[in-house]
Amino acid sequence: MAAETGIAELEVQRGENRVRIRRGAFPSAPEIVLPPSYGAAPSAAPTSIPAPTPHEGPKDKPADPNLVLVKSPIVGTFYESPSPGSAAFVRVGERVQPGKVLCIIESMKLMNEIEAETSGIIESRLVMNGQPVEYGEALFAVRTV
């Protein structure tokens, strides 16, 4: 199911119980988290579990100072058009002005329009249609003009 949806990692925590699921490209030791009442015996030496390798995504600061990254203000699902089969809000190479709707992020059954905050040309779209996005994840690169 993770491969079909494109999710790289999922973590769910309820109370003191936590489950983390990762897809194949994360070479690290399995992480087991137990509530404090199930801790290791006092005579056992603590072991260190290597930190997971972070998913390589677009850098927070683009190398080109004229590129501005439009980031997701919420966690949700990225949609490039208002409905399936409709034209995308914007295309690569298109000029945009502040206030122009770039995409929709669906979160908790609410459709949130993400608007351009600067004028420029859409240099690239950094996520796929229907892909889950995280808070602060780069969605578009806009070349300011």
Image (spheres, rainbow, N blue to C red):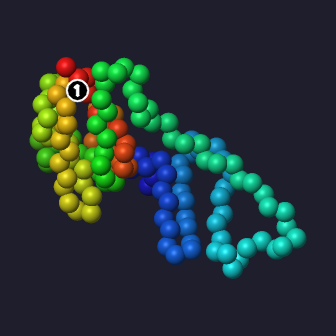
* In the depicted structure, whether residue 118 falls above or below residue 9: above
Res. 31 visible in picture: yes
Q: Residue 33 placed where, x, y %?
A: 64, 66
Residue shown at the point (50%, 36%) measured from the top left: 56
- Name the image quarter holding the C terminus: top left
Left or right side of 139 for 29: right
* In the depicted structure, whether residue 53 falls above or below residue 122: below
Q: Nearer the viewer, residue 25 or 72?
A: 72
Q: Which residue is mark 1?
A: 122
Left or right side of 76 for 121: left
Res. 128 visible in picture: no
- Crowd band around label 1 with a 10 angstrom C-alpha radius: few (<14), some (14–19), many (20+): many
* In the depicted structure, whether residue 81 falls above or below residue 124: below
Residue shown at the point (27%, 46%) measured from the top left: 78
The secondary element bearing badge 1 is classed as strand
Residue shown at the point (36%, 20%) measured from the top left: 64
Total labels: the figure holds 1
Residue shown at the point (55%, 59%) measured from the top left: 20
Q: Residue 2 placed where, x, y %?
A: 45, 52
- Name the image quarter holding the N terminus: bottom left
The amino acid type found where label 1 is placed reads Ile
Left or right side of 125 for 101: left
Q: Nearer the viewer, residue 88 or 76?
A: 76
Q: Residue 46 placed where, x, y %?
A: 80, 61
Asked which quadrant contains residue 54, the reply is top right
Q: Residue furthest bottom?
A: 37
Q: Residue 68 placed where, x, y %?
A: 30, 29
Asked which quadrant contains residue 31, the reply is bottom right
